[in-house]
């Protein structure tokens, strides 16, 4: 099985294109607009998970933990 790696410095768009199941997980974390195709296509192209965490006031530790529980390795 291929290792799923989330680089917190990659754009959300890139990550979601690489891992099609990711928008649902990010939605559950608190990035509720990510499931809207327009938001993913435009804002997602320049937004990273780090920037989004600051904007949405979501702890990076919470993001790392949740992604890890869903089978991803999280890197910076």
Image (spheres, rainbow, N blue to C red):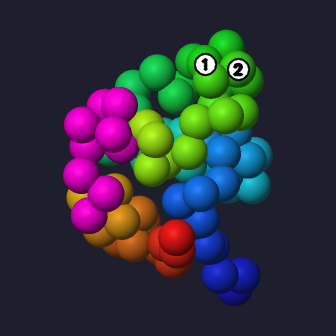
Report whether residue 58 is seen: yes
List the residue tagged with mark 2: 42
40 in relation to 66, above or below: above
Please tell me whether residue 1 belongs to the stretch shown in magenta: no
Quarter of the image where one finds residue 67: bottom left
Image height check: is 60 above or below 72? above
> Residue at horizontal 52%, vertical 28%?
34
Q: Considering the whole magenta stretch, tell me its main secondary structure.
A: helix
Q: Is residue 64 left or right of residue 51?
A: left
Q: In x, y percent, where is residue 1? A: 69, 85
Question: Is residue 54 on the magenta stretch?
Answer: yes
User: Farthest residue toward the bottom?
Assistant: 1
At a point 36% along the width and 43% down the height, the residue shown is: 53
Q: Are circles 2 and 1 on residues that touch, CB within 8 Å?
A: yes
User: In this rendering, would 12 be left or right of 26?
Assistant: right
- Tell me the residue at 45%/50% (across/down): 50
In percent of width and height, residue 57 lies at 24, 37
Which of these two is toward me, 26 or 21?
26
Residue nearer the viewer, 63 or 22: 63
Pinpoint residue 26: horizontal percent, then vertical percent.
44, 43
Q: Which residues are magenta?
A: 53-61
Position of residue 58 in the picture relative to residue 1 (left or right): left
Residue placed under numbered mark 1 in the picture: 39
Identify the residue at image location x=65%, y=81%.
Answer: 3
> In the rendered image, which quarter is residue 16 located in?
top right
Q: Is residue 66 visible?
A: no
Mark 1 burial class by Cα count in 10 Å: few <14, some 14-19, many 20+: few
Q: What label does residue 63 carry, if any?
A: none
Q: Dot 1 lies on which element?
A: helix
In space, the residues marked 2 and 1 are separated at their CA atoms by: 5 Å
Is 67 situated above or below 38? Answer: below
Query: How many circles with numbers are drawn on the protein?
Result: 2
């Amino acid at each position: 099985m291929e290792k799923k790696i989330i680089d917190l410095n990659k754009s959300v768009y890139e990550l979601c294109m690489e891992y099609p199941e990711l928008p649902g997980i990010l939605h559950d974390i608190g990035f509720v607009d990510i499931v809207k195709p327009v938001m993913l296509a435009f804002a997602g192209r320049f937004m990273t998970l780090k920037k989004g965490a600051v904007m949405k006031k979501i702890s990076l530790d919470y993001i790392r933990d949740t992604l890890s529980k869903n089978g991803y390795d999280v890197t910076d």
